[in-house]
Amino acid sequence: MENKPAARKNSIQKNTVFNLIKTGSSILYPLIVFPYTSRVLGAASLGRVTFGNSIISYFNMMATLGVTAYAVRECSRVRNDRDELGKVASQIHSINMCTTVIAYLALAVCLAVSQSLESYRTLIWIQSISILFATLGMDWLNTAMEDFRYITIRTCLFQILALAMLFLCVKRPEHYMIYAITGVISSSGANLVNIFYRRRYCRVRFTFQMNWRRHLPPIILLFAMMLSQTILNSLDTTMLGLLQGDYQVGLYGAALKIKNIVSQMVASIAWVVMPGLSEQFARRDYAKVNQLLRGAAMFTAVVGIPCAVGLMSIPREILEIAGGKEYAAAASTLFLLTISMVMGFATGIYGNMILLPSGREAQFMIACIAASVFNGIANYLLIPEFGSEGAALATIVSTLVILVITTWKIEKEIRFERMGQLLKAPLMGGAGIFLWCSLCKAVVENLYLKTGLAIAGSGLIYFAALALMKHEFYLEQILPVLRKLKAKLKRV
């Protein structure tokens, strides 16, 4: 019994490493893809694909119906009982199959009656394949079982396949359909392998005994929350496309893609700790809950702060290198989206790591619905005048609304102890990054040299700040690795 906490900590560390590798792969993929596609396709064709994805996101939300977060929580609680796990997983999967059929019927009606989507119909049908793959794959079962090793290997292999197809087949702006297919393969193609792999956990089958009374109420709550989140995440792109056209969507999509790369990397910690948090909330073991939350908050601060400062310091340079001079016009949009991302770090902790695992999805739902309303109003008022910058400003407003509501009436047992110690070194390092990047911009003219020096110097400055101030993350995570490397070098 005494070894359980150590084993649990070791498991979380391994899962974090695997999830970081997966997230790193998901980050590396767009870093490779975006500079190529932005130049080959151009802002208009890239904007068409982005707009199509924004439409699909609504029907994907209808198909998932809040199943993913609910399934991870419920399956985590019974993962040690193979028979019960199979029963619960089969019931949830069957509900998901029904909602997927409904989503496709709704999509067919929407495309048939909407004149504004007529030129996008083929593209949207192609992109909709990701909905079917996600439902069949049941990737939430792998997450509930904390099998991040398998998720990582599988995801990386399919992203390599998608990259090969992209570089071989996408050569001109009119090849944006093929680009959409590679997007489906990279994001959802790996789910097909799950159909065979999941047998190692339990037997999953379609059943008409879905236990609606047990599963449907919390799923509906999560659906309402996911609906508002999907609207929140896609409404800016959708309204921008309808009010301003594909070019503005292309600019906004470029800034949003870069911002999402960073936010996804930071948010990856949520899926690592969510199964453990669900288990400890069920036991009402707040000591372990606070321990997990503090670790997640430390990771968020240490990784998120330098990335955010870097994006805000050299947004134009990053966009120009990533997409070309055409996208440098989105520099102020990226700056504004980064501000919303920083606030999103906090909402991610309060929403995804406290409210959802503890079963308080109703409060999170209220926050997301309120934010969606504010987002729609702000987009309507700001986009006609400010374009992509207006959409970014609307995102800041909506993120602030979520932050205020999610932090309201958090249990008194939830404590983030010694947060000042966790934030001091990252903030000092962030200040050093800002000063160094400003110096590079003032002194160096060459775009690539300036950006390279800014990034390399920022990394050294930030690492030095963590080491000199003996930050907890440096002492517990980085220093042991450095010592092992030093020992290996001595043996060599």
Image (cartoon, rainbow, N blue to C red):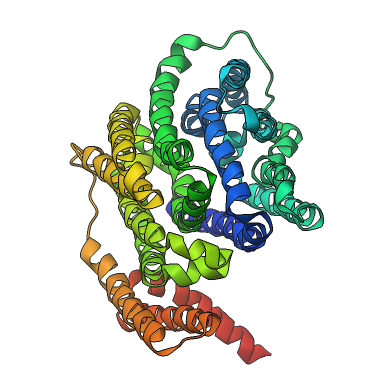
- At 67% from the left and 62% from the top, the residue drawn is 36
Query: 116 or 447, which lies in front?
Result: 116
Left or right relative to 88: residue 434: left
- At 37% from the left and 46% from the top, the residue drawn is 391
Query: 50 or 155, which lies in front?
Result: 50
Identify whether 492 is placed above or below 232: below
Image spot of residue 464 (x, y percent): 38, 83
Which quadrant would the C terminus be assigned to in this image? bottom right
Image spot of residue 301 (x, y percent): 34, 62
Left or right relative to 239: residue 148: right
Visible in this render: residue 134? no
- At 54% from the left and 44% from the top, the residue drawn is 246
- At 41% from the left and 59% from the top, the residue drawn is 334
Image spot of residue 427 (x, y percent): 28, 71
Image spot of residue 77 (x, y percent): 48, 31
Q: How many marks?
A: 0
Left or right relative to 169: residue 442: left
Visible in this render: residue 190? yes
Identify whether 468 is placed above or below 418: below
